[in-house]
């Protein structure tokens, strides 16, 4: 493969990554998941600390974990998050982007505004990893600082891009961080472990309407300043 072909393959893996919410039951071998994690662990981290820790589940073990966390959510259990993901009050342009993807998803599923029961049932699917055959919970030692969280994001992105290279799809899921005590209990983890997020890994269901959702991205010119170039158009 020459450099141009390699560049095209990398671009395709990145741009084809989407957060999919319906998976086929087709198994994903442990060796494949381990390969993805090995590749992803090449992510940079400050002083090579490698702050990530993954808890991978499949089969009956995954089902038991999902049953426990889903039951807690449906019972209305409220737990304090280990970290704040969103601002207390949304503001523009972030509010509009959030609304666009939220209502776009609900429109595909026939969920109208104020239909809280359907919204809750859809949200509960997070806790079954959207029926993916592999579910992963990611944790980090709570003594680490924001730099390690930045490193963690690069690691997670590596997993998702590497998965596309193998024809797999993923969905990173912040929802699990809303029930950190339940998640830790289900995995037998100490309080020292902060629940960062979950991730579904598997083969996307090509017939699921929910998987037709395509989110938009603003172009680089909208968020970047370019200086010192001879030709501003190149």
Image (cartoon, rainbow, N blue to C red):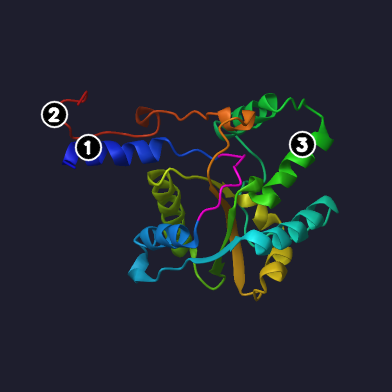
Residues under numbered marks 2 and 3 in contact, where contact means CB atoms less than 8 Å apart: no
* Left or right: where 111 falls relative to 164: right
Give above or below for 213 relative to 179. above
Q: In the image, which residues are magenta?
A: 20-28
Which is more N-terminal, label 3 or label 2?
3
Give above or below for 182 relative to 112. below
Judge whether residue 79 can be spotted in this image: no
Camera-side residue: 41 or 77? 41
Give how far apart the Cα atoms at labels 2 and 3 are.
52 Å
Task: Identify residue for label 1.
Answer: 5
Secondary element at tag 1:
helix
User: Magenta stretch: residue 22 in it?
Assistant: yes
Give the residue displayed 66% in from the left and 25% down from the top. Answer: 108
Residue 132 pos. (x, y %): 60, 48
Judge whether residue 20 can be spotted in this image: yes
Quarter residue 99 falls in = top right
Quarter residue 171 falls in = top right
Task: Identify residue for label 2.
Answer: 230
User: Magenta stretch: residue 76 in it?
Assistant: no
* Left or right: where 54 falls relative to 179: left
* Left or right: where 119 falls relative to 54: right
Label at residue 119:
3
Which quadrant is the N terminus positioned in?
top left
Give the residue displayed 73% in from the left and 39% down from the top. Answer: 122
Give above or below for 202 relative to 231. below
Which is more N-terminal, label 1 or label 3?
1
Residues under numbered marks 1 and 2 in contact, where contact means CB atoms less than 8 Å apart: no
Which quadrant is the C terminus positioned in?
top left
């Amino acid at each position: 493969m020459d450099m141009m072909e390699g560049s095209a393959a990398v671009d395709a893996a990145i741009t084809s990554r989407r957060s999919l919410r319906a998976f086929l039951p087709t198994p994903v071998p442990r060796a494949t998941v381990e390969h993805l994690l090995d590749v992803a662990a090449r992510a940079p981290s400050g002083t090579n600390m490698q702050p990530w820790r993954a808890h991978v589940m499949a089969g009956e073990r995954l089902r038991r974990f999902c049953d426990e966390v889903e039951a807690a959510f449906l019972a209305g259990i409220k737990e304090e998050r280990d970290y704040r993901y969103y601002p207390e009050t949304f503001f523009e342009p972030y509010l509009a982007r959030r609304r666009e993807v939220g209502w776009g998803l609900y429109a595909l599923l026939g969920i109208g505004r104020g239909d809280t029961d359907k919204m809750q049932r859809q949200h509960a699917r997070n806790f079954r990893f959207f029926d993916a055959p592999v579910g992963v919970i990611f944790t980090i030692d709570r003594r680490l600082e924001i730099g390690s969280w930045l490193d963690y994001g690069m690691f997670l992105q590596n997993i998702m891009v590497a998965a596309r290279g193998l024809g797999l799809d993923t969905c990173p899921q912040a929802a699990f961080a809303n029930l950190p005590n339940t998640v830790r209990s289900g995995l037998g983890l100490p309080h020292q472990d902060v629940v960062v997020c979950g991730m579904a890994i598997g083969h996307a269901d090509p017939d699921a309407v929910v998987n037709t959702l395509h989110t938009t991205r603003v172009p680089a010119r909208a968020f970047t300043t370019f200086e010192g170039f001879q030709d501003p158009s190149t």
